[in-house]
Image (tube, coloured by chain):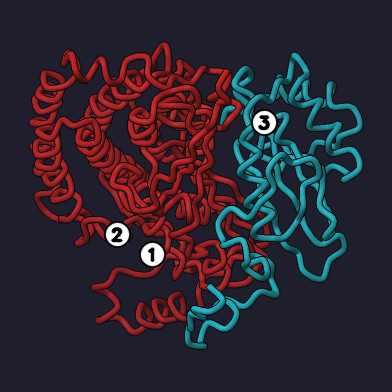
Chain colours: A red, B cyan
Amino acid sequence: MAETKYMTINMGPQHPATHGVLRVVLELDGETIVSSTPHMGYLHRGIEKIFENRTYWQGLPLTDRLDYTSGMSNNLVYCLAVEKLLGIEIPKRAQYIRVMLSELQRIAAHLLWVSTHALDMGAMTVLFYGFRDRENCLKVLETVAGARLMPDYIRFGGLREELPEGFLGEAKAFIDELPRRIDEYETLLTENVIWKRRLKGVCPLSAEDAIGYGVTGPMLRASGINYDVRKAYPYSSYEDFDFEIPLGTVGDIYDRYLVRLKEMRQSIRIVAQTIEKLPEGPVKADAPEYVPPEKDDVSKDMAALIRHFKIMSDGIKPPKGEAFVSIESSKGELGFYIVSDGSERPYRVRIRPPSFLNLGSISKMIKGSLVADVVAAIGSADIVLGEIDK
Amino acid sequence: MSDNSEFLKILSGKAAGIKIVPTPPGEPSAMVDKGSIRETLDHLRYDRDLSFNMLVDLFAVDYMGEEPRFEIVYILRSTKNNARIVVKTRTGDEGIETASDLWPAADFLEREIYDMFGLPFANHPDLRRIYTPDDFEGHPLRKEFPLEGKDFDKPFVVDLEKE
C-alpha cells in the first residue's frame, strides 16, 4: 500500500477571493481539504490601542475604518455605547433617521456581497448590475454625509445636522426601484443551474457549530437560528418597525445567499416605514455639555462658539463606568465595550468584530470539501479584513 | 432590554456561590474568583436551565498598577433564554485556563488576548500570536507599550545575510 502524503498549499494573502489580505494554509489529500489554518493580521493597525490615546470625539472616525462597507452601522454602535455611558436620551426623529441610514447601509453592503460573491463564482454579469444599484445607494448616503464610505454623520447625541432637502424623496425613489432590481438578481441567480450546483449543499454549518463558534448575522440565521440583535435587544427604536427575520434551513452557502437577499427586502420595508412615520423635532439631544451647537450658531453666537471650542478641545468626560452595546451590522453582531475612567479618553475600547468570529468557523466549514469550494466558503462568510485585523 | 426578572431568579438560584450584580447596562454581571472561574463557566455552559451556549465576546482589560493586574471579561449568551451575562475575573501575568473546549469561539479570542496582553491560557490547543508576527516583541495593548510602537522612527533595514 502506498503511503498517503498530504500536500500543503498556501492561499493568499494576495488572492482576489479572500476579499483582503487573508492567508489560508491548506493541507490537502488530493483535492480534499484535511485541515486549514487561517493567518491574519496583515492589516492590523491597533485601532483599540489608538482609541485609548484619543478623545471620544477623535475616536469616531476610527470606527468607519473597521468595516469599510458599512460605515453608518459602525458609527452608530460607537455612538450608542458612548451615549449609554453619558446617559443621554436621543430624540425620536434622530433615532428613526439612524435606523433609516443603517438599513440603507445594510442594503449597500449586501449588494456588494451579492455582486462580488457572484463574481467569485464566475457569474460576472451580476457584478455590473449590483454595482449600479450600490452606486445609487451610496449616492443617497452621500447626500447626507458628503462621503461615500466614511460618513461620520451619526454623532454623539444624535446626528451632525438635519437631513438635507430632498433627501427623503431620493431615498424613497431608491427603495421603490430596488425590489424590481432584486427580482433581476433572482432571475440571474436563484434558479440558475450552475449557481445552485456550485452552492447547494456546499460547506454547510450546523446550528450547533454556528452557535459554538460564535457565528452571528446572516450566517447564523442561514443555519436556522433565529437571533437578530434588532429583535433580541432592540436599539434605536427598532421595536417600532415591523419586519421579519429570514431564516435558512440547512446552513449551506445557498441558504446564506437566500437569507441575504431576503434581508435586503426586509430592509426596504424598514426604510419605507421610517420615511412614512418620521416624526418632526430636533435631531440632537438636549445635553449642552456633550453635544456641540449648530454650526450656524457657532459663527454668530459667542456663547455657542465657546461651547463648541470647549467640547472639541477639552473633549467630553463620561462618568466612570462600563458600557456594552451591540448592534446587528450587515456582517453580524458588532459590539463595543467601553471602559471609562472618568477622563476625556476611554480607558479601554473593545470591539467585537463579527467577521473575526465568523472567520473562526472557516476551518470547520471547509474541512472535507474541495479546494474550489474554499473560495465559495470564504466569500459566503462575507468577511472584511479591516474589521478582522482592527 | 429583554432581560427578565424571571430568568434572573433562576440564575441566582442556580449559580450558587456566584454573586450576581445587575450592572447599570442592564445585563447581569458576576465577578468570579480566578480559582473557580473554570467551574463557573462549566456550570453556566452545561446547566440545563441556564445553557449559555454562545460566547459573544472574550477580552481583557489592563488595569496597570492594580493587583491582580488584568481583568478577563466573558460575555455569554443563552439562545434558549434569550439572555446575556457578563462574567469577569482577575488574573496576573500567569494567565488562566482556556475555555476553548466549552466554546470553540474562545480559540481565536484567547489567541488575541495572548497576542495583545501576553496572557497565556493553559491547555489551549494552539496558542500562537494571531495578529502580530511571530518574532514581534512586546504586547501592544498593555498600558506600558508605547502608542507608536518600538523603534518606529528608525529606518527599516533588511539584512540580506540574515534573511
Label 3 resides on the chain identified as B
Is A348 situated above or below A240?
below
Question: Real-space Cα distance between discs 2 and 3?
Answer: 35 Å
Is B41 situated above or below A168?
above
Is A46 situated above or below A181?
below
Q: Amino acid at mark 2?
A: Met
Q: Amino acid at mark 1?
A: Pro
**Residue at position x 77%, y 26% from top?**
B44
Horizontal placement of B7 versus B13: left or right?
Answer: left
**Residue at position x 39%, y 77% from top?**
A308
Query: In the rendered image, is residue A243 in sight?
Result: no
First in sequence: mark 1 vs mark 2? 1
Q: Residues within 10 Å of mark 1 (few under 14, many from 20)?
A: some
**Residue at position x 9%, y 24% from top?**
A184
Is the C-beta separation of discs 2 and 3 under 8 Å?
no
The front one of A210 and B23 is A210
Q: Position of residue B64 (x, y in %)?
A: 77, 69
When asked about the image quadrant of residue B124, the answer is top right
Say the numbered circle drawn on residue B103.
Answer: 3
- Write down the residue under mark 2: A150
**Residue at position x 48%, y 61% from top?**
A44
- Residue depth check, mark 2 versus mark 3: number of the one nearer the observer: 3
Say the numbered circle drawn on residue A3.
Answer: none
- Residue depth check, mark 1 versus mark 3: number of the one nearer the observer: 3
- Write down the residue under mark 1: A61
Label 1 resides on the chain identified as A
